[in-house]
Amino acid sequence: MASQAPASTAAVLLGARNIGNPRDQGAGHIHWNAHLRMMLKEEKLLANMLVTGGVGFIGGNFVRYCSKQNPDDTIIVLDCLTYARNRSTIADVEQTDLVVGDIGDTALVEKLLREQGVATLVHFVAESHIDRSITGPDAFIETNVIGTSSLLKAARMFRPWDAHARPTLATRRAAQVVWRAQCLFTVEMQAPCRTRHNAGDHAPKTSHSGV
Ligand SMILES: Cc1cn([C@H]2C[C@H](O)[C@@H](COP(=O)(O)OP(=O)(O)O[C@H]3O[C@H](CO)[C@@H](O)[C@H](O)[C@H]3O)O2)c(=O)[nH]c1=O
């Protein structure tokens, strides 16, 4: 299990669903944003990382990518294993520690943050199959809005020294929340990621705040 991270490396990154811009070209062809690559490397954010939704499409590929960058660290994955799960994506990633649970379970999230000394929290959980919202919108509100908010609150309670950090909420077609802690950067959507629901090949713009 990952060891306690020093506060100096603490960074909480939420709502990463669009920062990496995995252009959906099929398994093995995920191109993470160059800035994200640099940030993960230089800021040592790979250590003690908790990835929500790490059994889904984007989260799973992110976990695979990170595990290759830093094979010595355990990546904790929090995932409910809903219909959208795809266990095979991370099945052979040995340094993954899967916790089956809900992002809305504040006690569980706080326990993980505290006991695992989580330095970076990357949030990919979502109701992502938009067509399902036509017949069942409640699940989308519960997970994407209330669940994300609950995660933010847990992160804030766990990292009181980040109280001055400004959470940035930017929405276009895909909502994203970036909790700006020690590693400051902003994420802006130029256009939605390419999905099977939206076949446009657009890239989100990620820029460093320079702080
Ligand atoms: C609703 C809910 C989901 N989850 C988990 C289940 C999944 O493992 C994960 C979400 O994964 P996915 O549904 O694949 O979402 P995501 O990685 O964004 O990928 C979707 O969106 C991509 C881009 O928009 C598409 O290219 C993919 O085909 C599509 O599956 O979150 C939870 O842990 N808790 C939840 O409440």
Image (cartoon, grey):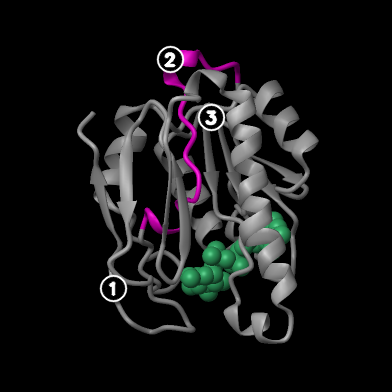
Which residue is depicted at the point 48% across and 84% down?
Answer: 197
Which residue is depicted at the point 67% across and 82% down?
Answer: 132
| Magenta highlight: main SS | loop
Residue 60 sits in quarter: bottom right
| x, y percent for residue 78 | 68, 46
Instruction: Quickly name the residue at label 3.
Output: 73
Which residues fall within the magenta stretch? 3-20
Instruction: Quickly name the residue at label 1.
Output: 202
Secondary structure of the residue carrying numbered label 2: helix
Ligand 1 falls in quadrant = bottom right
Mark 2 or mark 1, which has the lower sequence index? 2
| x, y percent for residue 113 | 65, 28
The answer to whether residue 50 is above or below residue 101 is above
Which residue is depicted at the point 47% across and 50% down?
Answer: 177
Tell me which amino acid carries mark 2.
Answer: Ser
Tell me which amino acid carries mark 1.
Answer: His
Mark 3 or mark 1, which has the lower sequence index? 3
Does 17 lie within the magenta span? yes
| Left or right: 188, with 63 as reference point | left
Disc 2 vs disc 3: which is toward the camera?
2
Q: Alpha-carbon distance for marks 2 and 1? A: 35 Å
The quarter of the picture where the N terminus appears is: top right
Instruction: Quickly name the residue at label 2.
Output: 8
Disc 3 vs disc 1: which is toward the camera?
1
